[in-house]
Image (cartoon, rainbow, N blue to C red):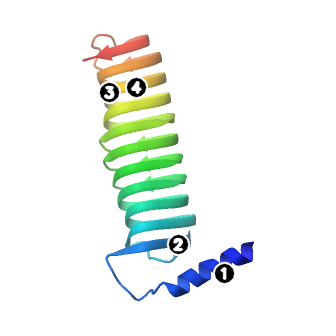
Amino acid sequence: MFRKAALFILLVMMLVPMSVRAEEKPFQLAVVNPLQLVPEDQSIKGVGLNLLYGSNENFSGIDIGLINHVKSRAIGLQWGAANVTEGDLSGIQLGFVNWTTGYMHGVQLGGLNFSQGDSRGIEWGIMNYSKDSFGGFQGGFFNYAGEMHGLQFGVINATKNLDGLQIGLANYNGNKKPMEFMVLVNWSF
């Protein structure tokens, strides 16, 4: 089985011309960066398969693998154990760890979800952490948003500034309107 898979990978790498330099390639096959079909400084618009770890500049489409890394902008689906977008995400991240450093507009479903920029959409996991402004729904054991516009549903919910509703055993609202800390339900509109 392993020999057949290795032969298939080598065949695909030989058949796809490496000398063609288009702005976006339709397919990525990576074992571990830099051992990948398309170099990391190029973009993919199509499908990516990362056996261990693959990295590209921009990605539009479906990026599947153990560790998926996009250096600038991701549009579409990232599905793996760890998904990292060092820029803006418009789409879905499904994995144990999902990380976005720029604007996140979409869905993060996993164990640990992190967004460092402004975010809009859904975060559902064990821990959801949105450093800046979050608009939408956070659901999990622990939810944090720098500024929350929407609903937090979990055991522990926290925000510096709430414009919405928190439902959980412990709810913290840094703007203290109407209450800083509430059990079961906290709100501020």
**Badge 4 or badge 1: first in the primary sequence:** 1
Q: Identify the residue position indicated by label 3 in the image.
A: 150
Quadrant (top left, top right, bottom left, bottom right) of the C terminus: top left
Marks 1/2: CA distance? 13 Å
Please state the total of marks drawn on the protein image.
4
- Residue 17, percent from left and from top: 45, 87
Q: Is residue 1 above or below residue 127?
A: below
Specify the amino acid type for callout 2.
Leu
Gap in angstroms between the C-alphas marked 4 and 1? 49 Å
Q: Is residue 44 above or below residue 143?
A: below
Q: Secondary structure at mark 4?
A: strand
> What amino acid does circle 4 point to?
Gln
Q: Amino acid at mark 3?
A: Gly
Residue displayed at 63% across by 78% down: 8
Q: Secondary structure at mark 1?
A: helix
Residue 91 point in image, percent of width and height: 38, 50
Q: Nearer the viewer, residue 95 or 101?
A: 95
Which disc number belongs to residue 152? 4
CA gap, disc 3 and disc 1: 51 Å
10 Å crowding of disc 3: few (<14), some (14-19), many (20+): some
Indicate left or right for 8 with 93 as reference: right
Residue 101 in the image: state x and y as whole percent: 36, 50
Quadrant hosting residue 74: bottom left
Q: Regarding mark 3 in the picture, which secondary structure is present there? A: strand
The reply to whether dot 3 and dot 4 touch (C-beta < 8 Å) is yes
User: Distance from label 2 to label 3 (Cα)?
Assistant: 39 Å
Picture residue at 47% right of the left edge, 18% below the top: 168
Say which mark, if any, is on residue 29.
Answer: 2
Which residue is the site of mark 1?
A: 7
Residue at position x 32%, y 41% in the image: 119
